[in-house]
Image (cartoon, grey):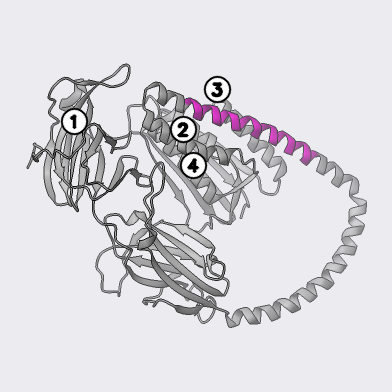
Amino acid sequence: MAGKAQKKPVSPSVDESVRYTASTVSAAFGIGISIDKSTKWIEYHNMMPNQPFNNYVFLKGTKTITVFGYLPKDSLKYYRYNVIENDKNWLAADATPNLKGKPALIGQHNYIAEINLGDFNVENKKLSIETYKITERNRVSTTTIYNKEIEPAAILWVTRGITGKKGGAAVMMEHLKDGFKFKIHDTLTVTGLNIVIKPTDVTFVYAVYLKNSATGRSILVSNNWLYDYFYGMGMHSALPYLTVNASFFNEPGNYELQIIPKLPGGFRIKSFPEKTTTFHFTVLPSDTVFQGKIVIKFVVIGLAVIACLVFVVFYVIRIRNKAQLAEQKQKKDIAQLQLDAVRSQLNPHFLFNALSGIQNLMNKMEIDQANRYLTKFARLTRNVLNNSDLINLSEEKTLLDDYLQMEQMRFGFHYEIVLDPELYTLNIQIPSMLLQPFVENAVKHGLTNTDVAGKIIISIVKKDTDIELSIVDNGKGFNSAKQNDGLGLQLSKKRIALLNAIYKDSPIGFEIQSSSGGTKVQIILTHWL
């Protein structure tokens, strides 16, 4: 039905006095819902990764909901909404909100129009509510009400990724059975396992755990599902798959893969262990490993002899250069003390800025957003106060995700973090808090008070033995030739200079380019790999 929401009989069991926030803060206009008394549970804040305009509300047992919209009173004519049932049945298309009655006063300063969009039967259904402003059609916000059973993941195939004849990556066209046994190094080198599952509406809720059966310890937890075509397997559409790198199971032994549905949740995480799907495999000792141990034994003996000779020579040289080494150590210690002093200034600077964001949300009476902001702020605080000099790339990405998702609640921009797949993020460490001050500067001084939809792209790529990090925004820019940097940028520049005094063989390059069309910060970790 185009232009008008389908009317449903009002259910007397719906309690309209209790409402749940169903949309994100970046939505074109707010969406809230009330649920009936048959509801067993509700999880109403489940944002998808890197999708600030989309949110899922998961329900169990609900039959009827009432949907409300919250819009500025003086701009109703600019807003539209769609309601789609099970991705194909359009209950409303390009509908204009219809204000009835007096608008409710919410907050201290803004009049908000509260609009009843109708009652909907959601029993065993998926209901999508799309909202947008006609002047910003590229920013469609989707609130998904999901009241279907979350089924256990259905594994279609488990295949091995291998190193091809010419050294490139390849995938074996096979269907490994539960309990499969193989060698990492034999006639081919296995680079990882690809788990291909049957696609669902909510593939993103399935988390993969890799466990060592002997210890019961989880080695890997991931829900990084990608989509691709697997030719030769009888399927003609892209399928979700997740790759487990062989570095996580390179030791011989028994392993178990578990796929557990787990809602992301903003305040708590709801999981369904009773719907776990498992796959077992065994890594056998490789012949090449055994031969390698024999070779290593002889190499160790030879190295021991060489080491004795080197030790004698080194001892003589060390005596000669003792004074010079002591002087170099003293300079390095001084640089380290100065670096620690800079980091001690950076941490409170970041914390005060984050607390200012929470205070701003509370002053605007956006309590839900302040609570979500505070949840992520708590995890960020633990990372910031950890006081470690180095952090692996995986932890750095998590820290940046937390910070940017926090700021999305306030400014509603889009961001993307691109990690080079050739980088083993858990094994590569970089100076902690290296990127965060520049990202913070991009958000607060580049994307605020602009007329365009804000966007930040962070990329971390491998170039030979270097790591190149860049932060690009489409903000208003600034004159990089002037010495008007904020405290965070000044401290970061000073910190890079001190790091170069310590890591002389692996210097850090730094450059800022800015114009009216945006700003690019580039950091190069030379010879870091």
Q: Is residue 314 magenta?
A: no
The mark lying in front, picked from 2 and 4, is 4
Please state the extent of the stretch shown in magenta in the rendering.
Answer: 331-356
Tag of residue 395? none
Q: Which residue is mark 3?
A: 484
Q: Amino acid at mark 3?
A: Asn
Residue 507, can we see it? yes
In three-dimensional space, the C-alpha distance between marks 2 and 1, rounded to whole angstroms, equals 30 Å
Is disc 1 surrounded by few (<14), some (14 to 19) or many (20+) residues within 10 Å? Answer: many
Whether pointer 4 and pointer 3 mark residues with C-beta atoms closer than 8 Å, the reply is no
Image quadrant containing the N terminus: top left
Figure check: 429 above or below 442: below
The answer to which quarter of the image holds residue 279 is: bottom left
- Ranked by sequence position, the earlier of labels 4 and 1 is 1
Circle 1 residue: 79
The amino acid beneath tag 4 is: Leu
Q: Amino acid at mark 1?
A: Tyr
Q: Earlier in the sequence, mark 3 or mark 1?
A: 1
- CA gap, disc 4 and disc 3: 25 Å
The three-letter amino acid code for the residue at tag 2 is: Ala
- Callouts 3 and 1 close, C-beta under 8 Å: no
Crowding at label 3, few (<14), some or many (≥20) Cα neighbours within 10 Å?
A: few
Q: Which residue is label 4 attached to?
A: 400
Residue at left 58%, top 57%?
427
- Give the mark nearer the N terminus: 2 vs 1: 1
- Tell me which label, 3 or 2, sits earlier in the chain: 2
Badge 1 element? strand
Residue hosting label 2: 442
Look at discs 3 and 2 and give the one toward the viewer: 2
